[in-house]
Image (tube, grey):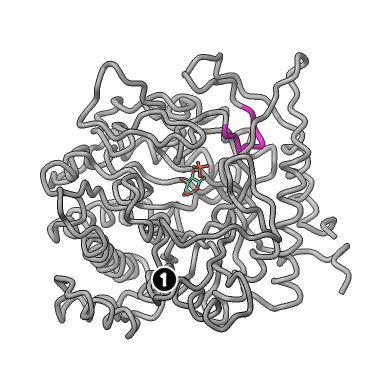
């Protein structure tokens, strides 16, 4: 089939994606409380970010100001409209609505900010797409309750979800509960369990057990939120958000293939529970084998069954590879190997457009639900020329190659794909490193890693390229 001249479905949602803490700034304005992101310092390429116990005046926290979207959003949304966005994915900072997380009444100033932001989008017919929890848990819940290790946090999350659904139900149709809930598969890395679950392990604690328990509470909260959201308004579409990194066997040796299968099961049991409403058997056996202490009640299992998601939202940046390790237990910190068939980005992410088509088909076969690519993109160093241009042909090439595979999955394989929102449509703070210099945007923001810079916005070459992709509904991608 020739792809040229063929369009995506008429109502396809082209847009861009961000998260509140990575672009808003205004970390202490409008009554906002401190979140996990507010105590995470600047790292670097290969240098992990530090998580501090409260704000240390001697440290630099890039998310405190970020790109100042909190004040500049009208200018930025106007630029999204100029590109032709049909939708804009962001998150609601939990700490703007419930500054500590455990209050009973929401903070009106925080609610008003998102009213204004969503109205600004809707003014241009841009549909807001919202993630409830995107690595920005209230710090108070982390310190007082130990984050998602405590069952009571389900109730606090539900208060937050209920307030958001009730307030924004006429402005926001598509929701996601927890961003990249499965990224904590890498539970040996402090950042992954802190960002996802607000967990700071105590010495001697079994991190794997902790992660499974926290994730269980999150999945119950997610299921309860799906159910409640539908009761509030049956039109709401509430999905999961999964970090899709297909895990290939390095060779066709049967043991490699079997190990890769177990690695996929381990990384994607989260979406199994989201979509199927029950735990996979192998995982229940894994809990038993390791004598994990798991608090899973009969009511939880009922909630999971009754709150399955409406669609699968997922991010896609790269693929992984593994080979047999002699035991059928996947450890993401140690078991990944280099794939000789794909090239890595400057940050070591293995770039693999074909893996996107594979992922779309894999999700489609496994869950038979609509899919939504809510993140994809290339983090790269950009250069602003003297005449204020950015010639980011490498980004255009990356995105073209991924859209091509996406187009094949939709037009040739029949995958039901709702939309595509490339990550960091405007340059923002990188989640893993805190850098500004790891840029994804179509819009350049004049800001350096240390926070210096004018914050002025400039259209990159990719801005005009993506504007044309949307205008032609992808028909020129071949
Ligand atoms: C995903 C997150 O992990 O990838 C985003 O949902 C993040 O928050 C994005 O920014 C890209 O990662 P990074 O570390 O390059 O910002």
**Is 107 positioned to the left or the right of 319 in the image?**
left
**Quick one: 155 or 247, which is closer to the camera?**
247
Total residue callouts: 1
Image position of 202 with respect to 334: above or below: above
Q: Which residues are magenta?
A: 438-444
- On whether residue 96 falls in the magenta region, the answer is no
Does the numbered disc 1 mark a residue whose Cβ is under 8 Å from ligand 1? no
Quadrant placement of the N terminus:
bottom right
**Quick one: 433 or 148, which is closer to the camera?**
433
Tell me which secondary structure the magenta stretch mostly adopts.
loop
**Is 263 positioned to the left or the right of 467 in the image?**
left
**Is 386 positioned to the left or the right of 69 in the image?**
right
**Is 137 positioned to the left or the right of 80 in the image?**
left
Q: Where in the figure is residue 169, as x and y percent of width and height?
A: 38, 56
Q: Where in the figure is residue 276, as x and y percent of width and height?
A: 39, 81
Q: Where in the figure is residue 167, as x and y percent of width and height?
A: 32, 50
**Quick one: 288 or 35, which is closer to the camera?**
288
Report the residue at 37% width, 45% height from top.
92
Q: Where in the figure is residue 182, as x and y percent of width and height?
A: 39, 61
Residue marked by disc 1: 271
Quadrant placement of the C terminus:
bottom right
Image position of 105 with respect to 341: above or below: above
- On whether residue 440 falls in the magenta region, the answer is yes
Q: To which quarter of the image does residue 407 belong?
A: bottom right
Report the residue at 14% width, 70% height from top.
293
Report the residue at 45% width, 40% height from top.
431
């Amino acid at each position: 089939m020739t792809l040229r001249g063929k369009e995506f479905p008429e109502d396809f949602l082209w847009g861009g994606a961000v998260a509140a803490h990575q672009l808003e700034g205004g970390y202490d304005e409008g009554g906002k409380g401190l979140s996990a992101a507010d105590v995470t310092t600047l790292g670097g390429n290969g240098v992990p970010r530090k998580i501090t116990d409260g704000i240390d005046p001697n440290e630099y926290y890039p998310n405190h100001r970020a790109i100042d979207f909190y004040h500049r959003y009208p200018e930025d949304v106007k630029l999204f409209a100029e590109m032709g966005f049909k939708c804009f994915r962001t998150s609601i900072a939990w700490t703007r609505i419930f500054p500590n997380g455990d209050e009973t009444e929401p903070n009106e100033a925080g609610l008003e900010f998102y009213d204004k932001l969503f109205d600004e989008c809707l003014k241009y017919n841009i549909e807001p797409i919202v993630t409830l929890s995107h690595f920005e848990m209230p710090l108070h819940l982390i310190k007082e309750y130990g984050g998602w290790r405590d069952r009571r946090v389900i109730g606090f999350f539900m208060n937050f979800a209920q307030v958001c659904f009730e307030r924004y139900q006429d402005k926001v149709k598509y929701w996601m509960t927890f961003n990249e809930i499965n990224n904590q598969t890498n539970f040996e890395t402090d950042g992954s369990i802190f960002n996802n679950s607000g967990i700071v392990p105590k010495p001697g604690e079994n991190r794997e057990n902790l992660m499974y328990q926290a994730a269980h509470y999150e999945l119950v909260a997610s299921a309860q939120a799906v159910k409640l959201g539908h009761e509030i308004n049956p039109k709401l579409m509430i999905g999961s958000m999964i970090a899709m990194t297909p895990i290939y066997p390095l060779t066709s040796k049967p043991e490699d293939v079997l190990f890769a299968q177990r690695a996929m099961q381990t990384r994607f049991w989260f979406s199994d529970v989201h979509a199927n409403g029950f735990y996979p058997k192998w995982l229940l056996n894994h809990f038993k084998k390791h004598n994990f202490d798991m608090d899973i009640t009969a009511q939880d299992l009922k909630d999971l069954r009754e709150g399955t998601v409406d669609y699968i939202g997922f991010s896609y940046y790269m693929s992984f590879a593994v080979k047999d390790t002699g035991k059928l237990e996947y450890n993401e910190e140690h078991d990944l190997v280099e794939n000789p068939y794909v090239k890595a980005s400057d940050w070591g992410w293995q770039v693999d457009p074909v893996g996107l088509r594979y992922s779309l088909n894999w999700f489609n076969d496994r869950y038979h639900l609509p899919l939504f690519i809510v993140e994809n993109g290339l983090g790269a160093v950009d250069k602003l020329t003297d005449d204020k241009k950015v010639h980011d042909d490498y980004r255009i090439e990356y995105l073209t190659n991924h859209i091509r595979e996406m187009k094949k999955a939709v037009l040739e394989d029949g995958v039901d794909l709702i939309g595509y929102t490339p990550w960091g449509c405007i340059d923002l703070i990188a989640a893993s490193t805190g850098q500004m210099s790891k840029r994804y945007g179509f819009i350049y923001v004049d800001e350096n890693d240390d926070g210096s810079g004018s914050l002025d916005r400039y259209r990159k070459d990719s801005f005009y390229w993506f504007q044309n992709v949307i205008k032609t509904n992808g028909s020129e991608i071949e």
